[in-house]
Image (cartoon, helix red, strand yellow):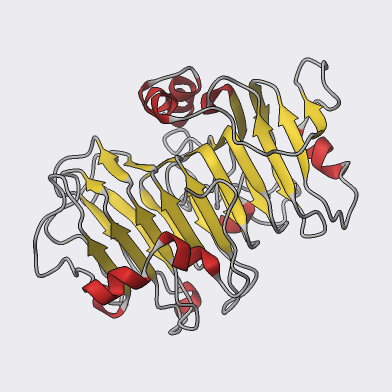
Amino acid sequence: MRRRRFLELAGGGAAGAVLTATVASPARGAPAPFGTVALDGSGDFTSIQAAIDSVPPGNTVPVTIAVKPGVYLGQVIVPSTKPFITIAGLGHSPDAVVIADDRANGTPKPDGSGTWGTSGSASVTVDGEGFAARNLTFANLFDEAAHPEITSKQAVAILTRADKLEFDRVRFLANQDTLYVNSKAAGVVGRAYFRDCYVEGDVDFIFGRGTAVFDGCRIHSLNRGSSPNGYVTAPSTDITIPYGLLFSRCMLTSDAPAGTVFLGRPWHPSNDPNAIGQTIIRESWIGSHIGATAWSDFGTWPWRDARFGEHHNRGPGAIASADRPQLTADEAATYTVAAFLRGTDGWRPQSCR
């Protein structure tokens, strides 16, 4: 069950232990705390949302919300009027601070006005530019098995729609649609950098039209007990945007049987023909859950029309195959961490290696 799995991880289970073993000390150069959140009342606030609400709209300098260990339940929204917010966990590892909710796409709203939808299911929604999170966990605790009456089971841990976001030593836990990396609108760039993070899910669990770099992350596919067992990515990158999802020096792992998980499939929201998704995986270790055919069609949209590619991967799932497009030397020189993040303003995240 989803909640049982979450409690195992929150208590330092296998996945949490892997990440804890690879993380370093807290990020350097963080601004002084704007306020501290603590469930026991020993801080300035008892909820994450209350701390965010207290940040003055239109702030022009970075502010840090420090969070003491605990499980903080309830939806969190960072509005576009409040940029440059950092949420920093004060625990010894990312599993010490957990920010979570438990709604899904098909969960009825309490006012009877329908269901939440995929975007509305997000435990955390980030619209504020320059947002950062460090040393904590974002989770969606929706329990699929406990709710057979809900057929739309997409349950997002975090939805990002802003630009220049950083996630350093952060865990993202859910099942379907865990991490929704989006932007303000089609054709608008929304960049996010994930360093030493852990992302867990099963169906399309890293998806959206945003430009996202996963640098040294562990990407873990859950075993659904089916075939296929799921899809790691479902990019919907707009044709005008040169960069989509990049996985560099990552580990792609799973307990699923060999060859039952796909690296990705091309998502075309509302059948948008301009959503020519991009996923690039380079210099990464790929487990045996990925087979010789690593990409899948999405309905009537063929994967071969998307922008999928690999470069110098290794591991039992890095299989030489005609169905595994490889980057040319020129393409590999172009599809780098710096190139994905640079944009027109030369952005380089503080935590970037």
Is 89 positioned to the left or the right of 212 in the image? right
Is 227 positioned to the left or the right of 30 in the image? left
How many marks can you see? 0
Residue at position x 82%, y 51% in the image: 61
Residue 239 appears in view: yes
Judging depth in this view, the residue of 310 and 293 nearest the camera is: 310
Q: Quadrant of residue 222?
A: top left
Is 251 positioned to the left or the right of 190 in the image? left
Residue at position x 30%, y 58% in the image: 281
Q: Quadrant of residue 4?
A: top left
Tell me where residue 168 appears, x and y as whole percent. 54, 41
Tell me where residue 338 appears, x and y as whole percent. 46, 62
Judging depth in this view, the residue of 253 and 195 nearest the camera is: 195
Tell me where residue 217 appears, x and y as whole percent. 39, 43
Residue 117 appears in view: no
Looking at the image, is 68 positioned above or below residue 323? above
Looking at the image, is 149 positioned above or below residue 238? above
Is 313 positioned to the left or the right of 150 in the image? left
Tell me where residue 13 appears, x and y as whole percent. 40, 20
- Image quarter where the N terminus lies is top left
Residue at position x 67%, y 53% in the image: 126
Residue at position x 20%, y 43% in the image: 287
Looking at the image, is 272 positioned above or below residue 332? below
Q: Quadrant of residue 346?
A: bottom right
